Structure formats: structure tokens, C-alpha cells
Image (cartoon, rainbow, N blue to C red):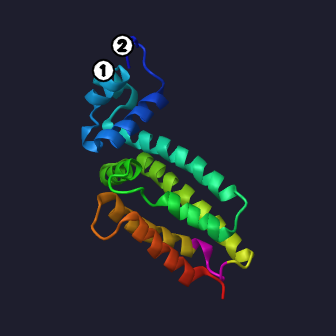
Amino acid sequence: MTGRRRNTAPPREDVLAAAMEMIAERGLEKLTMAALGREVGMSSGHLLYHFHSKDELLLETLEWSEGRLGAERGRLLMRPATARERLDAYVDLYVPDGHRDPHWTLWLEVWNRSQNADDGARERQAAIEGAWHRDLVALLAEGVSRGEFRPVDADRFATRLRALLDGFSINVAIGLQGTDREQVLGHVREFLDESLLAS
């Protein structure tokens, strides 16, 4: 960014957006504190002063990205449509766009680093997962109450469905041969038809 005084920090959200853009354009391996600093007109030391560590920067970037996804998910789930149509929209939003999807690339890195994370960071990661889970449970329960879905324990079914989505999504994000996005969406639709549709 040109014209920014070096002693004026950009808004935090601008830094997180720039980090996400760098991941999308250049890959996570190119996201260094020095490179990000050059992008936003800050020194790497100044970035470290604000974020304390690269792990914290990555987690905050993931939280920022999840906030945007959460708003989109809320719009999809509130629209006037059947529970099944909204469930398909939820799945569509969940599954990566393809190999090296930037959000999933970041998600995988943050979770990999969580092996050494403190309790606070783990709680923040759990909050991300919890938001997806609560929305899915509510949608499943609504579908059951309306008779669109056969009776299931919404919480248990959501746990299993998200495990299935996570497994498929990781395969898509890393580019595992034979598991592209359209194939995955087809598998998930078939599973939902077999498991949920009321006879």
C-alpha cells in the first residue's frame, strides 16, 4: 500500500484481509510476517507487536474468514426454502471450492498448529466448529419437525455428517485424485437421500 506512513498501523481487518488474499494468490507458504508487512506497509516487528506470533495471526485470519462465512451461512439458512434445499446450500458452502481453497488451506494449517496451542486458542477453534454444528443441528431438527426428514437425533446426525464433510473436504482441499468437488457433492447428496428423506 503506497502513501501509508510507516508508523500508522492499518486497521486490523485490513491486515487480516491482506493475509487471506496472500494465501489465495500465493499459497500459505508465501505468507511470512515480512511479506505481509510489505503488503500492508508495516514492519514484521510491528506486526508481531500487534499479533504476538504467526500462530495468532493465522487464527485471527481464520476467525475473520469464518465470520464472513457465518454471515453467508446465516443468509442461506434463513431464506424461504425447504429444509433439504437449505441443507444442500449448507453443504455447498462447507465443501472447498477446489484444490488449495484458501479458507480450507488456512483451516488445515491452524488445526495442524493446534497441537501446541494453548487452551484459549483451542477454545476459539472450538467456537468456530460450534457455530457450524449448531446451525446444522437446528436445520436438521426443523426438517424432522416438518416431516421433510425422517426422525433422527439431530445432534448425533450433525456430528456424523460434519465428520463426513470434513473428510471429503480435506481430500478436495489437498487435491487428492478422484475426490473433486462435484464428486464429493454427489456422494453427500446420495448419503443424505438415503439417510434423511422421509419415506
Q: Give the range drawn in magenta.
A: 149-155
Name the image quarter holding residue 184: bottom left
Label 2 sits on what residue type?
Answer: Arg
In the image, residue 100 sits, relative to residue 45, either above or below, namely below
Marker disc for residue 58? none
Q: Residues within 10 Å of mark 2 (few under 14, many from 20)?
A: few
C-alpha distance separating marks 2 and 1: 8 Å
Is residue 189 a member of the stretch shown in magenta? Answer: no
Task: Judge by depth and name the residue closer to the eye, 97 or 146.
Answer: 97
Q: Where's residue 61, x and y in %?
A: 42, 40
Residue at image position (34%, 25%) is: 39
What amino acid is labelled 1 in the image?
Answer: Ser
Residue placed at 31% from the left, 50% from the top? Answer: 113
Closer to us: 103 or 152: 103
153 within the magenta span: yes
Asked if residue 128 can be seen in this view, the reply is yes
Q: What element carries label 1?
A: loop
Instruction: Return the x and y of residue 94 as percentages of the image width and height.
Output: 49, 59
**Which residue does the image show at 33% across and 52% down from the upper left?**
100
Residue 6 image label = 2
Q: Is the magenta stretch mostly helix, strand or loop?
A: loop
Q: How dense is the environment of label 1, judged by Cα within 10 Å: few (below 14), some, or many (20 and up)? A: some
The reply to whether dot 2 and dot 1 touch (C-beta < 8 Å) is: yes
The answer to whether 121 appears left or right of 28 in the picture is right
Location of residue 1 with respect to 105 vertically, above or below: above
For label 1, the residue is: 43
* Outermost residue to the front: 182
Percent x, y for residue 111?
36, 54
Image quarter where the C terminus lies is bottom right
